[in-house]
Amino acid sequence: MSHIVLTAKPVSRQIDCRALSPQALQGKTVSEITAIKLTKHSTVGEVFEVSVDNSVETLKVTFKNTDSQHAYIGFGMTTGQVIVEGDAGDFLGAQLQNGVLICKGNAGARAGDRMRRGMLLIEGNVGDYCASDMMAGTLGVLGTTSAYLGYGMKRGTLLLAKTPAAQATWIDCGPHKLPFLNILYKSFKLLDSRFAEISSLRVHRWMGDMGGLGKAEILVIQ
Amino acid sequence: MVINGVEIDDTFAEAFNMRATRVLITAQNLRWAYNAANAMTGFATSVIGCGVEAGIERELTENETPDGRPGVSVLLFAMGSKVLMQQLETRMGQCILTCPTAAAFAGIESEDMISLGKHLRFFGDGNQISKQIPNAEGKLKRYWRIPVMDGEFLTEETTGMVRAIGGGNFLVLGTSQAQVLTACEAAIDAMRTFPNVIMPFPGGVVRSGSKVGSKYPKMFASTNDAFCPTLKGAVKSELDPRVESVMEIVVNGLAFEDIAASMKAGIEAACGLGKENGILRISAGNYGGKLGPHHFKLRPILSGEAV
């Protein structure tokens, strides 16, 4: 396996990172990665410094120095781990299929959009429409959330450290002690993330989005 | 062979191939873990009438369970995979799902994974929730959260099914019922310290050993008259005039070595009471060696050759 580090160069335009999923970079050399086209006119080498370490046992992609201009990080990823050591732009972890994506900074709008499986853990704040149309999986946010949280969310768990604003299409199910959180937190402890510090099994539960299927849940840690 | 004045018969226990699974049961505290496990392993003494033979293997600390709560591990044995799957689902539904705070997890990994909560999830009537969470090795495990009146019932989707052995046994022969029972209690205490084995009968001991067949056509097993003390002289007895009571310990295990090791410890503990406390002989039940492929020869086991 390999650990690929992508250090962002300063840019003033949005960078579409959807070509940089772990499965797309797996087994590639530095020159192969730098030659990947991000748009019709730009390559990875123009906006990222690339390094590859093939001595590790897991597949991991680390983004460094990123900011809100870096959109679609972890888009459709199916395996491995992605670590974002800065902020992330819109559509962080959109259509996530599997694996773990950790963002140590803030994320833009539509984080976890249409996410199907896996874990998306955001240590900072998120923008509007977080978990929109999410189908399953676990999305955690330690910071604040914005408008239209869980809009159209079908299934899955949105684990929050801070209470979001009340929304009409989410039903308050009250506070609970949920034993499955023991297992979830145990899996967090294996990660290099502030999520590993969570231990409270007591959560406030909402079900929604009742504008759609309504089988998803928001759990706010008490 | 004589141990502490107790004669060891030159015979063997005849055991059979079985299918087995292990389930880890956790709860808010050990009291409720035992309540669930005792219910699940209740009425599971013999496949003849119960479908499965089951028992509590050992207690688990908070560090040994997937959800960090205290628990116990149970082993279930059946003659075939179909019966094992049926019995596991029934017992999960009636004994674990119903028990306050109890949760169930896979206790063994195998290529053959069978349903633990996979079908039980439909009790949630559409409100059940699936969660896939990686374990310590990074392997994704699927759990089901089923809404119930005390909160949520948590169960892993599947557990492993493995090949195993059932029917390891030995007989304790003595001069009184009380002395034989005391020896059996000592044997069970020693055997319960071993992993991968269970003694499925009440308290681990069976007083109604059976033989194959009966004078009644509809019965395929009947009392082991050769070892019934009250029939001495009336039937072809295996007992000498001093023997007034015989009890049997049956042990099922995941491997030959597990059963042999526990039998060795159990027989040695029973013999520890010695001839002066009324323990006269140790024997074993078999069918002439033609039915079961696994033969636990008492003397090689006790001399350490077969463990």
Image (cartoon, coloured by chain):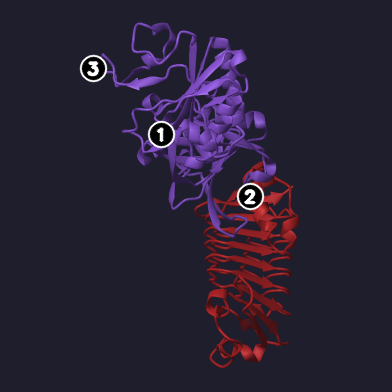
B119 versus A70 height, above or below: above
**Number of the front mark, 2 or 1:** 1
Q: Which mark is residue A172?
A: none
Colour used to depict chain B in the structure image: purple
Question: Alpha-carbon distance for marks 3 and 2?
Answer: 54 Å
Amino acid on which disc 2 is placed: Ile
**Same subunit, tags 3 and 2:** no
Q: What residue appears at the point 54 percent right and 53 percent down from the top-left corner?
A: B141
| Residue placed under numbered mark 1 in the picture | B15
Colour assignment, chain A: red
Of mark 1 and mark 3, the one earlier in the sequence is: 1
Q: From the top left corner, tell me how far across and down residue B297 is, in percent.
A: 45, 33
Q: Quadrant of the N terminus of chain A?
A: bottom right
Q: CA distance from mark 2 to mark 1?
A: 39 Å
- Label 2 sits on residue: A183
Image coordinates for residue A52, horizontal then vertical, percent: 64, 82
Q: Residue furthest bottom?
A: A41
